[in-house]
Image (cartoon, rainbow, N blue to C red):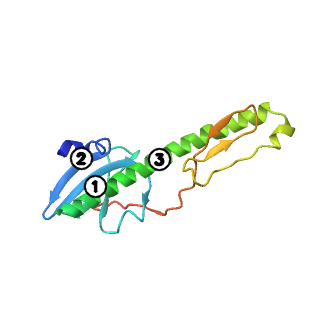
């Protein structure tokens, strides 16, 4: 596989890649509201840095120059991007669904609203919002991210 194909999922967030003696540093810039789950990031493997854009935070992911260590680091970065993008999509979907529910409550008789139920099938990974009003079914895939996140500190100030 080419270096280009390896980097393409990260290009939007990639600030630089540096060699530091026997270490490789992937310097990434993420939106400040993004979180870094503790389960993915070990202390000492990341270092914060100042980003030129105040809406972005800089994080360097450091590993020894070793095939498996670099692969692990790249996988961690990919998971962080995926988790945060998914969280953003879920938040957007949640807001849209809340707006739809507000409209439904404004336009629907109270007796019908009393029959409003939410059903989630356990075997289906994408929960469905079943509303017995006007035969409208809306998808709802919002769950609270219970993973702890860690804040990065800027070094060298």
Numbered disc 3: secondary structure? helix
Residue at (34, 69) in percent of width and height: 43
Closer-to-camera residue (4/30):
4
Q: Position of residue 141 (x, y in %)?
A: 57, 46
Q: Please say whether residue 32 is visible from this viewpoint.
A: no
| Separation of residues labelled 1 and 2 (CA atoms) | 9 Å
Badge 1: few (under 14), some or many (20 or more) residues near its Cα, within 10 Å? some
If you read the primary sequence from the N terminus, does the residue marked by circle 2 or circle 3 appear first?
2
Residue lying at 44% horizontally and 55% vertically, measured from the top left: 35
Q: Which residue is mark 2?
A: 6
User: Which residue occupies the foreground of this view, 39 or 137?
Assistant: 137
Q: Position of residue 152 (x, y in %)?
A: 38, 60
* Image: 104 above or below 156: above
Which corner quadrant of the image does residue 101 belong to? top right
Q: Are marks 3 and 1 in contact (CB under 8 Å)?
A: no
SS class of the residue under badge 2?
helix
Residue that numbered label 1 is attached to: 74
Q: Quadrant of the C terminus?
A: bottom left
The residues tagged by marks 2 and 3 sit, at their Cα atoms, a distance apart of 21 Å
Looking at the image, which residue sits at the far bottom? 43
> Helix, strand or loop at disc 1?
helix
Residue at x-position 49% and y-position 64%:
148
Q: Position of residue 56 (x, y in %)?
A: 38, 47
Q: Are marks 1 and 2 in contact (CB under 8 Å)?
A: yes
Location of mark 3 (residue) = 86
* In this view, 21 is above or below 142: below
Q: Is residue 91 visible?
A: yes
Question: N-terminal of the two: label 1 or label 2?
Answer: 2
Q: Quadrant of residue 110?
A: top right
* Picture residue at 27% right of the left edge, 42% below the top: 8
């Amino acid at each position: 596989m080419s270096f280009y194909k390896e980097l393409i999922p990260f290009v939007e967030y990639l600030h630089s890649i540096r060699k530091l003696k026997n270490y490789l540093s992937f310097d990434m810039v993420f939106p400040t509201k993004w979180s870094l789950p503790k389960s993915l990031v070990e202390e000492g493997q990341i270092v914060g840095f100042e980003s030129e854009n105040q809406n972005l935070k800089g994080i360097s992911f450091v590993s020894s120059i070793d095939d498996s260590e670099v692969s692990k680091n790249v996988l961690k970065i990919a998971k962080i991007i995926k988790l945060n993008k998914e969280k953003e999509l879920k938040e957007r979907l949640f807001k849209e669904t809340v707006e739809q529910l507000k409209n439904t409550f404004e336009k629907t008789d109270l007796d019908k609203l009393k029959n409003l139920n939410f059903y989630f099938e356990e075997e289906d990974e994408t929960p469905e919002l079943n509303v017995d009003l006007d035969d409208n079914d809306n998808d709802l895939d919002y769950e609270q991210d219970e993973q702890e996140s860690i804040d990065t500190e800027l070094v060298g100030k």
